[in-house]
Amino acid sequence: MKDKKRRVLIIVENLPVPFDSRVWKEALALHANGYQVTVLCPKGKGYQKKYELLEGVHIYRHPMPREGNSALGYIVEYGSALLWEALFSWWIFFARGFDVIQGCNPPDTIFLVAWMFRLFGVRYIFDHHDANPELYHSKYERKDFLYKAQVFLERLTYRSSIVVMATNESYRNLAITRGGMAPEDVFVVRNGPDLETFKLVPADSSLKYGRKFLVGYVGTMSIQEGLDILVEVADHIRSMGRTDVHFTCVGGGPGLAGLRQMVKDKYLEDVVDFTGRVPDEQLLRVLSTADVCVNPDKPCEMNDISTMIKIAEYMALGKPIVQFDLKEGRVTAGGASLYSDGKDLVGDFAAKILWLLDHPEERERMGKIGRGRVETQLSWDHSEGHLFAAYERAFDKKR
């Protein structure tokens, strides 16, 4: 059991907690290991309380403007978040105290909050969720002033961090090469599913809307996730005369309204369903019913080096996957997925979905491979030890 005087403030900007599953798993694991844990996050749909105590974790939530979907929108969103984070952090510091701030990006501005507490001996751990320069480039396809600002903020984030927690080896390499971090100060803490809570449930045939097959997706609805490609895939499959496939996409985000309009414009309302954010119980029913799950994240540098939690979640439920052939996606899924080469974004992706739907024995085989990889390598319990090691290093390391 750790010294209970070890106090942690986790700051996350882009999702409320406990909706942010990675942050919530980290918070619960640290609390169970004897740390006093406080989380500061934005309010969000279903999470409007300014303060609550959940399972021993203190959660403070600040107001947030509407999620940005443009360069100006992101500046307003992140600037507002930074102001609220600074104000709430001082309140939490005097009310509860903390010895470490763990900043979960995006954005790469949370180190500015940590700077205010350096004179009090507070240390900063960078929990690297997204490579922001690559994320910006994937959204806007330009390396302008704002891109250079992202590179600058990332550099300052690394320099302000006593320890970095990376979600995969590609991000660890960024911390060492681009961030100048010592290898012994960078820990890979993967975002695996919790097999105690993320479990297969009985399939619900009504979710197939009278079709034979269901293709499932879960994730954020924004530009780099490639949901526009998936809508085109659904349209292509229908144009081939296949009327036995339904697509259901679960999740929210700034691109949701545009995607629903795209579905309407293509007269695909009876083929593609965007549910928005739903309770975990409904999410599990959709994925448990799906015959194939997909990750249409478009080929780009950001997606090539990033690990998507949805891949491991599909695997935890024993579902075969179709995705583009990206480095970290292949590292995670291995033989549990078919990989589209990205040369024909729509046709080849659609062909691989249909091949899996028409080969049930392969779906079962690949599903077993995926489930086995999660059980032996990728579930959250395999990451907890790395989380604790990172914190031990942060507390023990001399400046």
Image: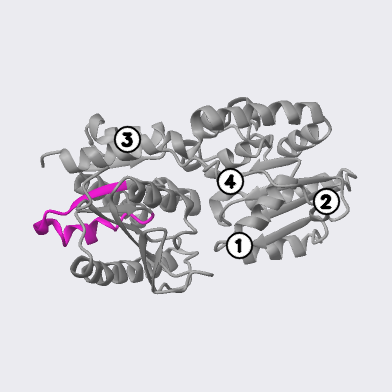
Q: Secondary structure at mark 3?
A: strand
The residue that disc 2 covers is 205
Contact between marks 2 and 4 (CB within 8 A): the answer is no
Q: Secondary structure at mark 1?
A: loop
**First in sequence: mark 3 or mark 2?**
3
Of tags 4 and 3, the one toward the viewer is 4
Measured in 3D between alpha carbons, the distance from the residue under mark 3 to the one under mark 2, in whole angstroms, is 43 Å
The residue that disc 3 covers is 187
Of tags 3 and 2, the one toward the viewer is 2
Check disc 4 and give the amino acid type: Phe
The residue that disc 1 covers is 277
Of tags 1 and 2, the one toward the viewer is 2
Measured in 3D between alpha carbons, the distance from the residue under mark 1 to the one under mark 2, in whole angstroms, is 21 Å
- Left or right placement of residue 313 versus residue 168 in this view: right
Residue 59 belongs to magenta span: no
In the image, residue 150 above or below residue 338: below
Location of residue 39 by image quarter: bottom left
Residue 121 belongs to magenta span: yes
In front: 262, or 148? 262
Measured in 3D between alpha carbons, the distance from the residue under mark 2 to the one under mark 4, in whole angstroms, is 20 Å
Which portion, as a residue range, is magenta? 106-126
- Left or right placement of residue 333 versus residue 237 in this view: left
Rendering coords of residue 292 (x, y %)? 73, 40
Check disc 2 and give the amino acid type: Ser
